[in-house]
Every structure is written in structure tokens, then in C-alpha cells.
């Protein structure tokens, strides 16, 4: 789960494992938008879904940490 959700620290991202899949997807979305593969509307919709998923994973990580 740490691979999916980067941990925010001092306005920078510290990535665990393979480098933070959510942040990698965000980066690829910007590239796809810049190259014209996505419209602005498609970009916004996917970006919002990714933000929602990232928050859900963060909450799950917090929950599981408390269970230990």
C-alpha cells in the first residue's frame, strides 16, 4: 500500500517501495494531457478519481496501523 500512496513530508513526497504509483500516474496524466492524448475534461475526471483512491488508501493504511 505504501507503493500506491506517497507520504507527504515538508512539501515534498517521500516514496516507499517502487516509487509511489499514484504520483507516477499523476505524472503520466500530465504528460498525456500535454501531448493531446486526453482532453482537459478527461484529465480532470481521472485526476479526481486518482485523488479519491489515494485518500482511501491513506485511510486504510492509518486504520491498519492502529490495528497493530
Image (cartoon, rainbow, N blue to C red):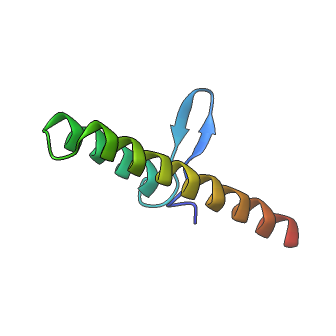
Extreme-top residue of the structure: 11
Q: Residue at x 70, y 63 (%)?
A: 61
Q: Nearer the viewer, residue 56 or 2?
A: 56
* The N terminus, quarter of image: bottom right
Residue 37 on image: x %, y %: 15, 46
Extreme-front residue of the structure: 41
Q: Is residue 59 above or below residue 24?
A: below
* The C terminus, quarter of image: bottom right
Residue 5 on image: x %, y %: 55, 55
Q: Residue at x 80, y 65 (%)?
A: 63
Residue 55 on image: x %, y %: 63, 52
Q: Nearer the viewer, residue 15 or 5?
A: 5
Extreme-bottom residue of the structure: 68
Q: Is residue 11 above or below residue 20?
A: above
Report whether residue 5 is seen: yes
With 60 as the anchor, is 48 left or right in this view?
left
With 3 as the anchor, is 68 left or right in this view?
right
Q: Residue at x 71, y 65 (%)?
A: 60
Q: Is residue 57 above or below residue 22?
A: below
Report whether residue 20 is seen: no
Q: Nearer the viewer, residue 55 or 49?
A: 49
With 10 as the anchor, is 51 left or right in this view?
left
Q: Residue at x 22, y 45 (%)?
A: 38
Q: How many numbered marks appear?
A: 0
Residue 62 on image: x %, y %: 77, 59
Amino acid at each position: 500500500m505504501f507503493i500506491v500512496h506517497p507520504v507527504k513530508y515538508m512539501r515534498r513526497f517521500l516514496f516507499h517501495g517502487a516509487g509511489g504509483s499514484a504520483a507516477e500516474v499523476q505524472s503520466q496524466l500530465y504528460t498525456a494531457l500535454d501531448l493531446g492524448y486526453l482532453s482537459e475534461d478527461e484529465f480532470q475526471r481521472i485526476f479526481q478519481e486518482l485523488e479519491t483512491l489515494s485518500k482511501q488508501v491513506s485511510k486504510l493504511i492509518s486504520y491498519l496501523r492502529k490495528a497493530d
